[in-house]
Image: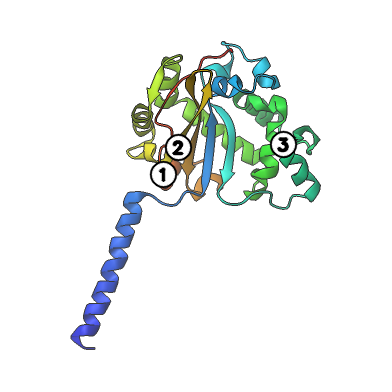
Amino acid sequence: MGNLGFRVIALFLLSIVAGSAFAQEGGGRTRFILAASWQPAFCQTNQRKAECASQSSDRYDAKNFSLHGLWPMRKDYCGVSDADRSADKGGDWRDLPEVKLSAETKASLDKVMPGTQSALERHEWIKHGTCTGMSADAYFADAVRLIEDLNESAVQELFAANIGKSLTGDAIKAAFDKSFGPGAGDRVKMSCRRAGNSRVISELTIGLSADATDGKGRDLGDLIQGAGRTSFGCNEGIVDAAGF
């Protein structure tokens, strides 16, 4: 083989090494999204929902993140009948099949997902959970565990300490980095909504790696670190208090 051939091979191997280093530095690929709602903000524009009408300042979701869902990327409604898909898209969630959960999982889910009062879990299972390859009980047990990890972190502490006040994206990203490792905040997107004259923080969507549903109970920090980077979205908003 001539010198040119060796040079081509060397450049090819160098490109592989460089590409691997870039992938490691930038994280992996986002395969799942953990959607964490700030329930008081959600309820400002959904006051008639059962979980909002019953909200109080001493309930869990007044100072902790609520589970919206655990979503596989780019696929939904796997093996779902046309009738159930139509009912779901029409918002007729109580017409969807009941989700079979153990008593332990149901109790934990009711705590972290107040939307179960409006049959949110039926919607989440039909649209998203059916595409994970997991049983409903395992899917929701994992989702509960991940939202509990978030609620035991510096991110929850930051939000709870600043109810009624404004938070910047930089402060929130720093809290993610503190709890889940450097760069974790770069895997998070924040959404805000208008409530009267205020812009309130409504939700955090957190990128996770493909290991989110492998059944091994991986830490939230490990799953975040394995995801790809994203833009943060809304850069500042108020942490809304419970009540209208």
Q: Residues within 10 Å of mark 3 (few under 14, many from 20)?
A: many
In the image, what residue occupies the spot 28% across and 71% down? Answer: 13
Name the quarter where the C terminus is drawn.
top right
Give residue 122's mark: 3
- Residue 98, image x and y in percent? 77, 36
Q: Which residue is mark 2?
A: 189
Q: Is residue 15 above or below residue 91?
A: below
Q: Quadrant of residue 173?
A: top left
Q: In the rendered view, does 32 fall on the left or right side of 125?
A: left
Which residue reaches farthest left? 3
Circle 2/circle 1 CB separation < 8 Å:
yes
Q: Which residue is mark 1?
A: 230
| Residue type highlighted by circle 2 | Lys
Q: Is residue 13 visible?
A: yes
In percent of the image, x 58 and y 43: which residue is there?
71
Q: Percent position (x, y) of residue 179?
A: 38, 31
